[in-house]
Image: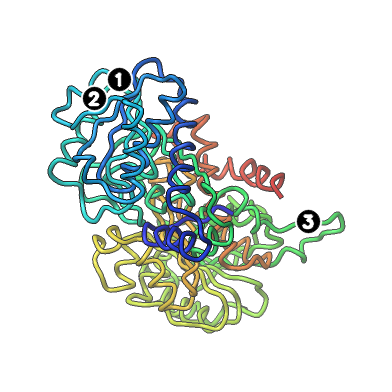
Amino acid sequence: MLWLASGKQMREIDRRAIEEYGLPGQNLMEAASAFAASILVELKPQGQVVVVAGSGNNGGDGWGIARHLAARSLAVKVVTSTNPEQLQGDAAMQFQAYDSLDLPWEKYQDPSQLADCAVIVDALLGTGIKGGAQGAAADIIAAINGSSGAVLAVDIPSGLPAEFVPPTGAVVQADATATFGLAKAGLYTAAGRQASGTVYTNPIGLPGTLLRGTGLVLNDKGHAAKGLPLRSLDSHKGNFGHGLLAAGSRGMSGAAMLAGTAALRSGIGILTIACPSEIQPLVAANIWEAITLPMPSSAKGEFSPEAAAQVPLSKFSAAAIGPGCRVCPGTRALAGRLLKSESPLVIDADGLNVLAPGIPRRETPTIVTPHPGEMARLLACTVQDVLAHPLEICRRGAKAWGCVVVLKGATTCISGPTGDAALNITGTPGLATGGSGDILTGLILGLLAQKTEPFSAACTAAWLLGTASELAAEEMGIVSQLPRDVLAAIPKAIDSLWHRQ
């Protein structure tokens, strides 16, 4: 499991390692420097390496990296943003070790010092930055980004917050990042993923007991595989649950079909699609494997309020509502009845909108899948608030409502009611089209019906949706990718997880 840390958490881990385990800080810095230097050597630089060193421990790492590179006979110099005589602690010791070898260094003056080099090592700011980079630091970041050399960031690209929040200023755009102890959460924001390049992580000798239990994990393939139900040779449809999908309305039958097909592809045993009677023939004609349940329809082709009482809830092992439902009295009545049921429940789209400004707490598991606009309505805040602090907002909603929240985005945040969370980074911009969320809802419904634990179901479904988009992009590209292309790739995505178990 790949645990992630904020800057505050990583500083606490370092403190405990030094004070409770007796590990000298200089040893940790030396290990970090040696690791980053080894990553740079793998880049095979064809020319001079310039290490840009700042004033803190990140700069200390930079001086150590430069010394290790010189020991490997690479052409290296340090360009420092500060007077190195003013460095303190471990960083000062690293400068002194470098300087004692009479190796070259100079104070930063202008971008020309970084112009003609093969590789730049960014050891300018590190994880301690608060707010955006300003003044001389912003100028140096611009110079790094304007250079033609490859860039290796030390621990985190300068200007990028270690916390899972977007940056507010300039950020170094690196080709690779060597990070220490645990990968930092900020590396997996949309801006972080763009800025960090390939991320290499090394524990640098920190005790393993300190490098877990941070409350945040990366939803990688191994983590996602935990939510995929196993199948024995004597399996039958009754082993894999009966799901209810309440979806669709006039002009929105496609949402019901996308979600329904995704649920079926997840391996669900039986699926019933409850939809307004007006669109039932269309849904039934296009999804042969599902049972369709025609429900009373309003004059507008939506669920009528009478529909709620006609759903036989006791039959189902899980339910979902929302895709294509519209905001109307019928959707509100149906959502209210499902919330009072004993079935695990997925709520999406207009199923969420009719419940704003909040999700009622219930004893049975609930998963909600808002995009930022829906999340803002549910928490009575602004979309800007959600985008500025997505992980914090996701956790806040999960705790307030006692459910699992899947906050959709370029990096999807998934949180349980205890605050334990995961970040999902699979996917492509091809998912930025209507219908993608319907597929996610169907996948979660199918996994819940198969008795997958709710948090795991959300993580597995998010990984599958993103991976299917990546697979579809290999054939269809990104711009022209349709949700139906993603649906077609789900079996291959599931098969890759199946073989990971």
* Residue 486 located left or right of residue 249: right
Mark 1–mark 3 distance (CA, rounded to whole Å): 56 Å
In this rendering, position of residue 309 left or right of residue 392: right
- Residue hosting label 1: 117
Report the residue marked by disc 2. 114
Residue 445's place in the image compared with 33, above or below, is below
Q: Quadrant of the N terminus?
A: bottom right
Amino acid type at mark 2: Leu
x, y (%) of residue 458? 54, 61
Seen at 30% across and 54% down, the residue is 128
**Mark 1 / mark 3, whichever is N-terminal:** 1
Does the rendering let one see residue 79?
yes
Q: CA distance from mark 1 to mark 2?
A: 6 Å
Q: Quadrant of residue 345?
A: bottom right
Outermost residue toward the top in this view = 46
Q: Which mark, by number, is residue 231?
A: 3
Mark 2 or 3, which is nearer the eye? Answer: 2
Q: Position of residue 99 (x, y in %)?
A: 31, 32
Q: Can you name the residue that lies furthest to the right here?
A: 234
Q: Is 301 above or below relative to 34? A: below
Residue located at (34% from left, 19% from top):
48
The mark found on residue 197 in the picture is none
Q: Are marks 1 and 2 in contact (CB under 8 Å)?
A: yes
